[in-house]
Image: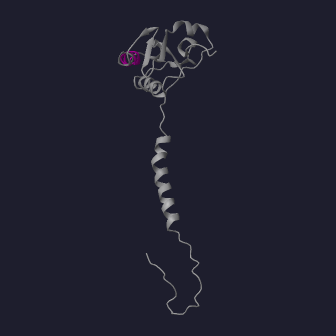
Amino acid sequence: MGMSVGPSSGGSGGSPMVDINTTPLVDVMLVLLIIFMITAPLLAHKVRINLPQQSTDPADKSKIEQKRLELRDLGGAVEIRLNNDPISQDMLFTEFREVGRKVKDDQPEYKLEADETVPYSALANILAAAKRSRVERIGFDNLATPTSAQEGPPPG
């Protein structure tokens, strides 16, 4: 880079320098380019899963086994219940693998229920495990708010 210190003619009647320094502009643009290059792939990450479609035939619903999967936040730990029985995440993933080996018509339908205090990562892990295991029938039943018993006494 060069630097201009004034007119080389030695006279004092030179005109002021009116050039714009573009170096800071180029630096800012390069930093923004790097930030966008790093964050763009992170925004495109998705977990694809086929959610069950609502059937119009009531006879179809009666043939499918229903399993209720509940997630509750217990102050930092997430409790998982399958049909009201506590189950560990590893046991749930093992069940998903067993169910995934069956054809779609023989698979049960999982209804996932979670309150708003359950971290998204817990839901994402379960949905991703179901997708990896080829579980075809999993959906959301009721994403409810915590019950009044879990919230504590009412103000007053």
How far across and down, in percent of the image, does residue 37 sit? 47, 50
Image location of residue 70, percent across then percent down = 48, 15
Query: Residue 41: x percent and y percent?
Result: 46, 44
- Nearest the viewer among 139 and 134 is 139
Locate the C terminus and report the quarter of the image it occupies. top right
Magenta range is 93-101
Please state, as top left, top right, bottom left or bottom right, where the N terminus lies in the image: bottom left
Task: Using residue 94 as the reference point, say whether residue 131 is left or right of it.
Answer: right
Q: Is residue 81 above or below residue 47?
A: above
Total numbered labels placed on residues in the image: 0
The colour mode here is: one colour
| Magenta-colored stretch includes residue 81 | no
Residue at 51% across, 9% down: 64
Prevailing secondary structure class for the magenta stretch in the rendered image:
helix
Q: Which residue occupies 50% across, 55% down?
A: 32
As for residue 100 lying within the magenta part, the answer is yes
**Vertical placement of 47 versus 3: above or below?**
above
Residue 95 in which image quadrant: top left
Return the residue nearer the eye: 69 or 101: 69
Residue 125, position in %: x, y? 43, 26
Q: Nearer the viewer, residue 134 or 24?
A: 24
Residue at 55% over, 11% down: 149
Q: Residue at x 42, y 20 (%)?
A: 77
The residue furthest front is: 156
